[in-house]
Each structure stands twice: as structure tokens, then as C-alpha cells.
Amino acid sequence: MKETWRWFGPDDPVTLAHARQAGATGIVTALHQINDGRAWPREEVMKRKALIEAAGLTWSVVESIIVHEDVKTRTGNFRKLIDNYKASIRSAAAAGIRVVCYNFMAITDWTRTDLEFVMPHGGTALRFDIIELCAYDVLILKRPAAEQDHPKARIETARLRLAAMSESDTARLERNLIEWVPAREFVYDRQSFRRMLDTYKEISAEGFRANLFEFLGEIVPVAEAEGVRLAIHPDDPPFPIFGLPRVVSTAADARALLAAQPSPSNGLTLCTGSYGANGQNDLVGMAKEFAPAVHFAHLRNVTREPDGSFHEAEHLGGDVDMVHVVAALKAEERRRKQEGRADWEIPLRPDHGHAIVDDIGKKTNPGYSCIGRLKGLAELRGIMRTLDALT
Ligand code: DNO
């Protein structure tokens, strides 16, 4: 498997040199400065690629070309935005980048309530607390339908929790939920978030799925013509939040998506952490079932908590059987090789990492620490080498 590393561009405190020292050979990045639906100019992609290559690395995967909200809701300027999206795919292809990761999450990209959850080892992890989400949704944001979306007992617990939180705790919770986290390109305040939620009032999950499939109908042929493999990232968390429709959360969702537009260019990012936060998802089973369509793997682990909360575990700890997921992906690579495919290698990145050792107290993008990810990658590499020796 191709060992890759996410890099957020020249402003990322974790540099390309760090990625190289971690042993990665591929870089996963985007033109983060062009995140509002504009087309990516070829020259900009080439400039970024040159920077990566000067560090002795290759740009293996684009993550992500943002899908604009107007495309997701099929309102406003969506036709022009889809043309821009196609142009960006072509620009990536012109630079020789063959895998494009994207997501179709309404409004929010990945969402956590706590970016510095202290683990027993003293480092920190990302955590999603369902009670705090409920407290924010029902009691602070006061979303009109929120009370119907949470069980009564959870709301009562949330009321007590909120009463015990300081003002700075609640401010932090709000920031984590609706402002910035890395890769969430749009930042909201309470008012603008409410307005955005309103744009989804009339969109059911089925309607949203139809919008996704129409979008696929538009972009998959372009990707196919360009030799690009699209890899949709699952919803994180993989269940509805803020009453928003969710359509890439389960194995059934992935199955429907692949069937809607059968093509070697219509594929998945197997994010073991995102799918893994839903106990119904059997990650080893999914890795096997969807193997031919897995164009990119985000390998990270989660520990699910009894009330539906979860936190990010060690890469080989937690609820996902990482060894067997990796084994399934490596079996798929062997199959591709036998088919004579030049692109048999599946890029993987150690997704997220705890903040440990020198990461602690350093300003890095939450989840994208250097040492925590380096440790994750090293552990995953250990699995791969062992499997190589035994197969
Ligand atoms: C979180 C990431 C996601 C991912 C996007 C893909 O750390 O895995 O933000 O980049 O959802 O579009």
C-alpha cells in the first residue's frame, strides 16, 4: 500500500520534511486556498505539485475538492459550480493525480465536540460526545425540531451537563461544532449556521441522495475520461446531526452509491474511523465487499461509548479490527496486480493521531499532529510488513 500523509499546504506546522521523516512517500493535499467552488487553475496545481516534489515526495491524492453547498442542495449557481468541479478534476488529472477524495456531508465536514480529550496516557484525542451535541443543538442553538431528534432522557442529561459547564466550556463547544476544524472549509456563527440549516428544511434523506446521484452522473464520466478515481469520504459521524440528511454512513449507503453509477471512477474512501463510529458497520466485511471500489484508505480507530459517543483510539486499539482491514486491502492489491493493473497500489494515510510527546502544547491542526500520526503510520507499516512476510 502506498503510505501517504495529509499535508495542509505551506501553512501546515507539520511540514513536508516531517512527512518524509515519518516514512511517507505520498502526499494528500488540496488547494485549500481555493475552497469556494471556483475551478482549480492548472498552474496552481502544478505549483503545489512542484513544492511537494522538491521535498522528495509525490502528490498522490487530492483531498478534497470541496462540493459547494449549492451543488448539494441543487440551488443557486449549481450548474456553473459543477462545471468548475469538472475543471478542477481535469486540472488534477493534468498534474498526474489520479485519486480525488471528496465528501457529500450537508454543511458540516467532520464534527467533534472535544478536540483535546485527555487520554489515560496523558496525551489527547478527538472525541464526539452525544450529550454535548444534544446540549448545543437543543439548548444553545435551539434548533426548532431538535427536541424531536433526541430521546427525552438524553435531553435531560444534556440539561444537567450544560448547567455544570462554564461559559468558556460552552464557547469552546460552539467553536468546535460550527466554526473551524481542519478541512471544514466554511466557518459559521450561530446566525449563519441557523440560516444554513434552513436551506435543508425541505430536503429529505432520499432527496439528498438523489442530489448526490445526479452529481455523480455529472462528474463520474469526466473522471472516467481523465483516468481519475473518485473516492467519496463517509459521513463523520455516520448518523444524522442537526437534523441534516446523511447518505454515506453505512454499507447499504455505499452499495447504493456504487450501483447508482457503476464505473471504475466511482469509488470510496474507506475511512475506518468514520464508518467505525457506527456499530452496525462491519469494517472488515466492508473492506472485503467493497475492495474493488476502495481507491483510498483512511486508517484510524475509534472506541464507541455506550450512549453513542465515541473517541479516537490508538490506530491499532479501539473497536475496528485494523489487522484484518489491512489484510483485506492487501488481498485486493494482489488481485489488482494479477489483473495486470499499473495502479494496483491503494494509497492509505494514518488518519488523525493523538497529540503525544512533543505534539502536546504545539499548535497543529486538530487531529493532524506529527508524532501521533507518525506513530500510527509506523504501527500500520508493521502490520503491512508482517502480512507481506506471512502471505
Ligand atoms: C477529517 C477528514 C475529512 C475529509 C473530508 C473529505 O479529518 O478525513 O475532513 O477530508 O471529509 O472530503
Image: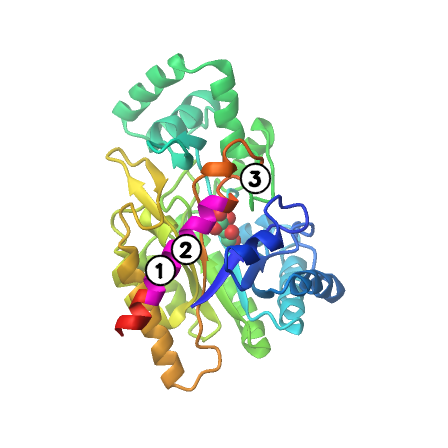
Q: Distance between the residues labelled 2 and 3?
A: 20 Å
Mark whose residue sits in front, 3 or 1:
1
Q: Mark 2 points at which residue?
A: 378
- Quarter of the image with the C terminus is bottom left
Q: Name the residue under label 3.
A: 364
Name which residue type carries label 3.
Thr
Could you classify mark 1 by the number of other residues whose Cα lies within 10 Å: few (under 14), some (14-19), or many (20 or more)? few
Q: How far apart are marks 3 and 1 (CA)?
A: 26 Å
Question: Does residue 89 lie above or below 162 as drawn?
Answer: below
Mark 3, secondary structure of its residue: loop
294, 188: nearer the viewer: 294
Question: Which callout, 2 or 3, points at the residue further toward the start of the chain?
Answer: 3
Say whether residue 4 is magenta. no
Q: Which mark is residue 382?
A: 1
Question: Does residue 96 lie above or below 100 as drawn?
Answer: below
Say whether residue 384 is magenta. yes
- Quarter of the image with the N terminus is bottom left
User: Is there CB contact under 8 Å for labels 3 and 1?
Assistant: no
Instruction: Say which residue appears at 47% left-offset and 21% top-offset.
Output: 140
